[in-house]
Image (tube, rainbow, N blue to C red):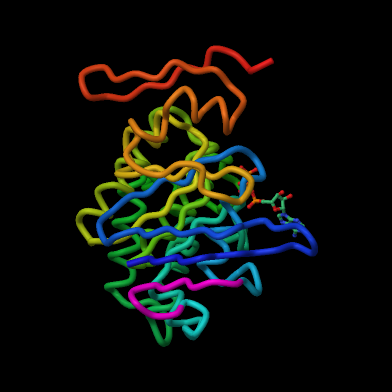
Amino acid sequence: MLHIDALHYRHGECEILDGIRLDVAAGEVVALLGPNGAGKSTLLRCVNQLAGRYRGRILVDGRDAAALAPRELARTVSWVPQQAGGSMALRVLDMVLLGRAPHRRRGSGERDLAIALEAISRLHLDELALRPVDRLSGGERQRVMLARAMAQEGRLMLLDEPTSDLDLRHQVEAMQAVREIARARDAAMLVAIHDLALAARFADRLVMLAGGRIHAAGPWCEVLTPANILAVYGVHARVGCDDGIPYVIPTGAAA
Ligand SMILES: Nc1ncnc2c1ncn2[C@@H]1O[C@H](COP(=O)(O)OP(=O)(O)OP(=O)(O)O)[C@@H](O)[C@H]1O
């Protein structure tokens, strides 16, 4: 579904992404890990054609992402930005309905409404549906942005730290929803995320970035090794698995 080959991206003299090669299959959840500034958001923005010029190839469903018309791209790629954008004076329902905009010609139809309401329900936002987004808490707002992306029904979803403001229960529910949607719709999910244990629990594969390069990629048990965590984050950690459930406990910063 998503194929990235030899992707290079620069800001001035600074090489932000340096030869990224990455595939995400339909139905697969891939977590993008790495410290602040590693290039996770930039990578997602390149795929969604928001970063400007890059070198290399990005194919979405076999088509060159750079050659897709904006509307076609928006039909194919759902996007949860790191910081919520758009008019926050909108009601939650209207914000989520914006996810349907690439699919419709004029106003929302019954099907659009049904899809938006389903996304709202899936993220337990029913009671907030008629509230203006700018009167919600940070975590509630983040769930609205996730619901909007779900209503967009892209076959590829790019999620930039979708759980960073969420409490523990909502983190788990959001990642469960991401995984279920990947399976149910055969959608490809690329999720930038800082919580290593959450990534290990819900993603099929992890990709660990450092300094714009892929340091490690594969199943969690190959990527989340104490050696990789020390090399990339400068943190000592215990990593284990309890009855099939992975855990990561940071024990201290390296000297
Ligand atoms: N507009 C810009 N101009 C110059 N440098 C930029 C710009 N945007 C991002 N960068 C730099 O690109 C690098 C990668 O940034 P990016 O936002 O992709 O990192 P990230 O891995 O998503 O980090 P975080 O975990 O903090 O969100 C950083 O060093 C950042 O300072």
Residue in the image at 37% along x and 21% along y: 247
Q: Residue at x 36, y 41 (%)?
A: 175
In the displayed structure image, the side of residue 185 where residue 250 appears, left or right? right
The number of numbered discs placed on residues in the rendered structure image is: 0
- x and y percentages locating residue 61 in the rendered image: 33, 74
* Residue 153 in sight here: no
**Magenta residues, as a range?**
55-64
Where residue 140 appears, x then y in whole percent? 50, 42
Q: Residue at x 52, y 36 (%)?
A: 194
**Residue 216 is one of the magenta-drawn residues:** no
Magenta stretch contains residue 57: yes
Furthest residue to the right? 13
**Is 142 situated left or right of 126 in this image?**
right
* Quadrant where the C terminus is found in the figure: top right
Q: Height in image: 150 above or below 64?
A: above
Q: Which of the 4 image quadrants contains residue 236?
A: top right
Q: Is residue 219 above or below residue 27?
A: above
Relative vertical location of residue 50 with respect to residue 84 in this rendering, above or below:
below
Quarter of image, res 207:
top left
Can see residue 233?
yes
Of residues 25 and 125, the one nearer the viewer is: 25
Q: Residue at x 47, y 64 (%)?
A: 94
**Dominant SS in magenta:** strand
Q: Position of residue 81 (x, y in %)?
A: 55, 56
In this rendering, would 38 be left or right of 94?
A: right
